[in-house]
Amino acid sequence: MTDFFAFKLLPPEEWTRWRESGTFEGSPVDIADGYIHLSTRDQVRETAAKWFAQVDPTILAMVDLQPLGDVVKWEVSRGGALFPHVYGTIPLGAVAGHSKLRLGPDGKHVFPAGFD
C-alpha cells in the first residue's frame, strides 16, 4: 500500500494511558481480535461513525506506519476494503500528531480543518 499514515480512534482515557506508558498495546477490541485496528484517511470517518458515535470527545491519533515495518498488515475488512492492522504494539514515537474530535450538532464527529 502507498499510505504512510493511518489513524487510530480512542477514548481519552486510552490516549492518556498510551502517552503515559509510551506504548500502545491496543484497545479491548484490538486485544480480543489479536491486532490493533487502524483506518486510512478515507476510512476513518466511517469508523468514527460506526464505533465511536457516542464517544465525545474521541482522540484521533495519526500513526506513521513506516517505523512499524512488517508488523503492519493490510487486510480485507469492512466492505471489502483493505485496512491497516498492527500485529504488535505502537510506540508513542510513531504518533505524528493527534486531535480531539467532538460531536457536532448533527451527531457526527467534527474533524480538523483540511482533514479531507
Image (cartoon, grey):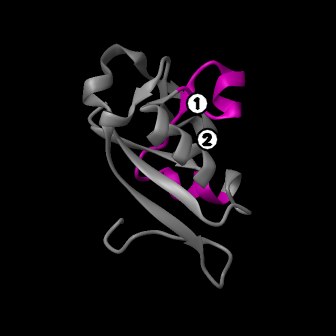
Q: Position of residue 84 (x, y in %)?
A: 45, 31
In percent of the image, x 63 and y 35: which residue is there?
A: 27
Furthest-top residue in view?
70
In percent of the image, x 60 and y 65: which residue is there?
A: 57
Position of residue 54 in the picture relative to residue 21 (left or right): right
Quarter location, residue 56: bottom right
Position of residue 63 in the picture relative to residue 37 (left or right): left
Furthest-bottom residue in view?
105
Instruction: Select label 1 or label 2 by which is in front.
Output: 1
Q: Inspect the image, locate mark 1, and give the three-letter code of the amino acid beneath it.
A: Gly
Q: Inspect the image, locate mark 2, and give the three-letter code of the amino acid beneath it.
A: Gly
Is residue 26 in the magenta section? yes
Callout 2: helix, strand or loop? helix
Q: CA distance from mark 1 to mark 2?
A: 23 Å
In percent of the image, x 66 and y 81: which residue is there?
A: 106
Q: Position of residue 81 (x, y in %)?
A: 52, 37
How many C-alpha atoms fall within 10 Å of the one at disc 2: few (<14), some, or many (≥20)? few
In percent of the image, x 67 and y 56: which residue is there?
A: 52
Q: Earlier in the sequence, mark 1 or mark 2?
A: 1
Callout 1: helix, strand or loop? loop
Would you name the residue on which mark 1 appears? 26
Against 109, residue 79 (above or below) is above
Quarter location, residue 109: bottom right
Q: In this view of the protein, which residue sits in the foreground, 80 or 32? A: 32
Where does the magenta region start and end?
25-49
Against 31, residue 5 (above or below) is below
Q: Position of residue 15 (x, y in %)?
A: 53, 46
Would you name the residue on which mark 2 appears? 79
Numbered-mark total? 2
How many C-alpha atoms fall within 10 Å of the one at disc 1: few (<14), some, or many (≥20)? many
Q: Position of residue 30 (x, y in %)?
A: 64, 29
Position of residue 43 in the picture relative to residue 70 (left or right): right
